[in-house]
Image (cartoon, grey):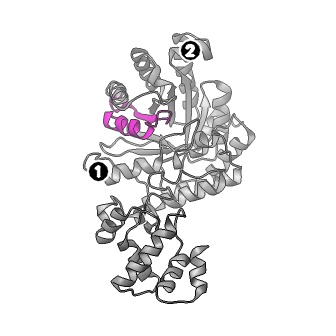
Amino acid sequence: MQSVERLTSRFSPGGFTLANNRVYIFDTTLRDGEQSPGCSMTVHEKLGMANKLVELGVDILEAGFPIASEGDFEAVDAISREFPWVQVAALARANKLDIERAADALKHARRPRIHTFIATSDIHLKFKLKKSRQQVLDEAVAAIELARRYTDDVEFSAEDATRTDGDYLEQVSRAVVAAGARTVNLPDTTGYSVPDEYRLLIKRIADALGDSAIVSVHCHDDLGLAVANSIAAVQGGARQIECTINGIGERAGNASLEELVMAFRVRNDQLPYETKIVSEQLYSASQHLSSIITFGPQPNKAIVGENAFAHEAGIHQDGYLKERTTYEIMDPRSVGVPESKLVLGKHSGRHALGKRCQDLGFQLTKEQLDEVYHRFTTLADRKKGVRNDEIAALVHHALGGTHAFAAAADD
């Protein structure tokens, strides 16, 4: 390992100043996300995903946990080399070996961040760490002081912050900032908190720290509240959100980056915050991640799911065809989805079927459309959806076409 002096000389300060409405996106897809079952990535895959995250415009890219494996160390180093202008973070427990390993992995980064953590809740202290509050406080401060010897940009995370005694959490937060931490992360590690409760906790620590540090949040989705809690935290004064593409992560996952970004954008009247995310890259980032892990988002996943801009119910399709905004609150192109989909199934109406027939090149009279629609509903009752070739066959049959088309419709 290089000396402290040499590392310090190569590291540029990588922090940022707090703006009232600016929210910084700390992406941990390659660290917390990659830790979850079915999501491990090779160094090459991490580099490819990092490229998508850079295109997306994330502010901080957490590239791995260098002490965990040689692969994670190599990934942090490779990403630091490949994207020298990007703020790259590496995770480390609050101990000397982890921090030195993280610093070594980051030695080629121009904007390195060491992200060190230790649990602060009594349940973790008693059963996992078997340490006193004072011991944990001392170790947290010592970790920050050591990390600051390698870089000016140090983040501290109080693991299980939402189940930590409030007075003690404030004491730890003040102490690590005094020791040199520029960001204090208060994770809802177990997804236990609820929005109002979390907002008040964040407000307390944000008020205590003032302008001396950025308050960050990292929410898990065990109760399905990760995005709601992250938004509540921003309302309470947090200005960094740690999140992942598709919401992947330990257990039920993390707060979904795409949902947070679009909530701020679509409901800016109620959530007057801004990020630097290029929203048109959200869908491609989601698709790229899905291509390198073992699963994609569920079909009804907000923003990037297969059905996020799909309409099947006849009432919805009719309204959508008359005016898109009747049933869509965002343009699919704003998140990189090429277009909305009208899914033709048993719930679809004449308007949508007529539009599809027109798109397929058929100009039908009302009577002809009625005939096609009757045959369509009979077929749709037996299927999950009706394909374009099947619709064409129905039209040809209604217009007196060949038996081949009629047979195709019955397949």
Q: Is residue 186 left or right of residue 402?
A: left
* 284 vs 123: above or below: below
What is the number of the mark on residue 268?
A: 1
Compared to residue 384, the image places residue 154 above or below, namely above
| Residue at 65% in and 25% down | 96
Count neighbours of disc 1 (C-alpha within 10 A) and say few if under 14, some if 14 to 19, many if 20 or more. few
Label placed on residue 125 = 2
x and y percent of residue 165 in the render? 43, 16
Q: Nearer the viewer, residue 234 or 18?
A: 234
Report the span colored magenta.
210-238
Counting other residues with Cα less than 10 Å from the Cα at mark 2, is it few (<14), some (14-19), or many (20 or more)? Answer: some
Q: Report the amino acid beneath label 2.
A: Leu
Q: Is residue 211 magenta?
A: yes
Look at the image and tell me in which quarter the C terminus lies. bottom right
> The residue tagged with tag 1: helix, strand or loop?
loop
Q: Quadrant of residue 326?
A: bottom left
Q: Tell me the quadrant of the picture where the N terminus can be found.
A: top right
Q: Quadrant of residue 104?
A: top right
**Residue extending farthest right:** 70
Q: Residue furthest left?
A: 269
State the separation of the CA atoms marked 2 and 1.
40 Å
Q: Is residue 60 visible?
A: yes
Q: Position of residue 274 (x, y in %)?
A: 34, 50
Q: Residue 251: percent from the left, percent from the top?
A: 58, 35
Q: Secondary structure at mark 2?
A: helix
Give the number of marks. 2
Question: Tag 1: residue type?
Answer: Asn
Q: Magenta stretch: residue 1 in it?
A: no
Residue 286 appears in which quarter of the rendering? bottom right
Q: Is residue 210 left or right of residue 176?
A: left
